[in-house]
Amino acid sequence: MITLRHVAHAVGAGGTNVPAYRVEILVGAHRLVGDEPLAEGGADVGPSPFGFLLSGLAACTVTTLRMYATRKGWEFSDITVDVRYDVDESGKASIERKITVPQSLSAEQRDRLAEVAARTPVTLAIRTPIATEMVPAASA
């Protein structure tokens, strides 16, 4: 018998008494609003579904890299994850992820974090190929 571990649950609801594409979303104790951009007929009152997908990927990447760095005793301040979802003219989708870490990290540490980023739980759950770039932050 296979044992399942509950990871997350979300409920989205829309209807005739709200703008066309507005979706009220309940994730645990959190209430969110999703919508489509104006150009797609929505009212743009919240992120699009792809915006939420990328938000989850960015959040998971930052969290996982922070956990890994903490376990390794690597002390540094900020990690920024910038993700983008694109579709080419043939309909092929791609995700680009740019991870900016402090300059104080060595090339070996950046390489290791890139390897960890490639295996974050949300990265593995997304079937679209994700190209990841690891860059040091600009010096101040």
Image (tube, rainbow, N blue to C red):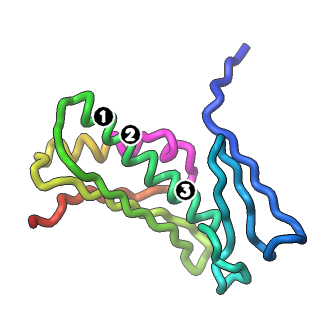
Q: Nearer the viewer, residue 52 or 32?
A: 32
Left or right for 132, reference 123: left
Which region is colored magenta? 116-127
- Kindly identify the amino acid type of the residue bearing the numbered disc 1: Tyr
In contact (CB < 8 Å): disc 2 and disc 1: yes
Instruction: Tell which circle, 2 or 3, labels the residue nearer the N-terminal end.
Output: 2
Q: CA distance from mark 1 to mark 3?
A: 24 Å
Q: Position of residue 76 (x, y in %)?
A: 18, 45
Classify 55 as above or below 107.
Answer: below
> Label 2: which residue?
64
**Please, which residue is most extreme toward the bottom here?**
39
Q: Look at the image and say whether residue 124 sits in the magenta stretch.
A: yes
- The relative height of residue 134 versus residue 62 in the rendered view (above or below) is below
Determine the residue positioned at 90% across, 71% down. 16
Q: Which residue is mark 3?
A: 128
Judging by the rendered image, the residue that carries numbered circle 1 is 68
Of marks 1 and 3, the one in the foreground: 1
Front residue (pair 40, 30): 30
- Decide: few, some or many residues near mark 1? Use Cα within 10 Å; few <14, some 14-19, many ≥20: some
